[in-house]
């Protein structure tokens, strides 16, 4: 074979190889594109605040908070009167009774009431969160249904995403479905007795911890 023919054959071989490689790259790109993740977005905060059920939470919560605050204020007023009565009759008490009464009043004023106020806020926040969680729990099967229908591979909360195309946000679809199935959600009632119980449990736990940390004498 002449050098000219060899050159032509080599050029054709390179050309054929290039076309083949190009075809392989195109196929690989197509395969990669086919496996690209489908990401959907949902705003769970909106599901809670904008749903029919979620809108019933603030009113219930305010009623419960006002009720427990009324009980708490009555407890503070009782302490105030007990202090006034002590001040009036302290001179008639024995040293032992006076000292014990002062300690009890100081404990109620400086420890028990502030602790109850703090726990009241915690317990109140917890019952609201439980009610909100019920709404999101009801929405779970709806989210899964839409994810399956669209062949999505990821569902992210709006708070974790800087930007998403509107067509990828399924919040309104979920809201529409949620409002058909859930019109209200109950916020568990809380009383001062519940708060006192929690406070007693916290105090008992704290005392046990301190006792365990106390060094033993040889």
Image (spheres, helix red, strand yellow):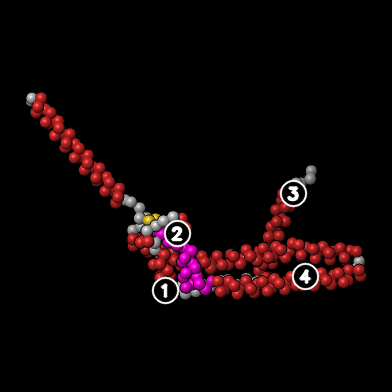
Q: Is residue 56 magenta?
A: yes
Mark 2 Cα within 10 Å, few/some/many (few <14, many 20+)?
Answer: some
* Residue corresponding to mark 4: 79
Q: Which mark is residue 158?
A: 2
- Nearest the viewer among 9 and 190 is 9
Secondary structure of residue under mark 2? helix
Point out residue 164 in the picture as x, y percentages from the top left corner.
39, 57
Marks 4/1: CA distance? Answer: 50 Å
Mark 3 Cα within 10 Å, few/some/many (few <14, many 20+)?
Answer: few
Mark 2 or mark 3: which comes first in sequence?
2
Whether residue 198 is visible to the viewer of this picture, yes or no, is no
Mark 1 or mark 3: which comes first in sequence?
1
* Residue corresponding to mark 1: 180
* Residue 88 falls in image quadrant: bottom right
Marks 1/3: CA distance? Answer: 58 Å
Marks 2/3: CA distance? Answer: 48 Å
Mark 1 Cα within 10 Å, few/some/many (few <14, many 20+)?
Answer: few
Point out residue 179 in the picture as x, y percentages from the top left corner.
43, 72
Mark 1 or mark 2: which comes first in sequence?
2
């Amino acid at each position: 074979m002449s050098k000219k023919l060899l050159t032509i054959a080599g050029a054709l071989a390179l050309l054929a190889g290039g076309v083949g490689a190009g075809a392989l790259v195109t196929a690989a790109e197509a395969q990669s594109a086919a496996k690209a993740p489908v990401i959907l977005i949902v705003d769970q905060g909106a599901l809670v605040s904008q749903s029919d059920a979620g809108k019933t939470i603030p009113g219930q919560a305010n009623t419960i908070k006002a009720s427990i605050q009324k009980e708490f204020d009555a407890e503070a007023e009782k302490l105030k009167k007990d202090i006034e009565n002590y001040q009036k009759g302290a001179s008639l008490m024995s040293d032992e009774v006076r000292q014990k009464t002062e300690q009890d009043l100081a404990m109620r004023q400086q420890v028990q009431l502030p602790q109850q106020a703090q726990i009241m806020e915690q317990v109140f926040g917890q019952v609201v969160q439980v009610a909100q969680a019920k709404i999101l729990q009801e929405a779970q099967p709806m989210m899964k249904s839409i994810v399956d229908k669209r062949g999505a591979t990821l569902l992210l909360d709006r708070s974790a995403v800087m930007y998403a195309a509107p067509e990828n946000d399924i919040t309104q679809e979920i809201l529409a479905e949620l409002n058909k199935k859930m019109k209200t959600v109950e916020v568990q009632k809380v009383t001062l007795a519940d708060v006192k119980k929690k406070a007693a449990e916290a105090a008992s736990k704290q005392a046990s911890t301190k006792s365990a940390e106390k060094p033993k004498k040889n």
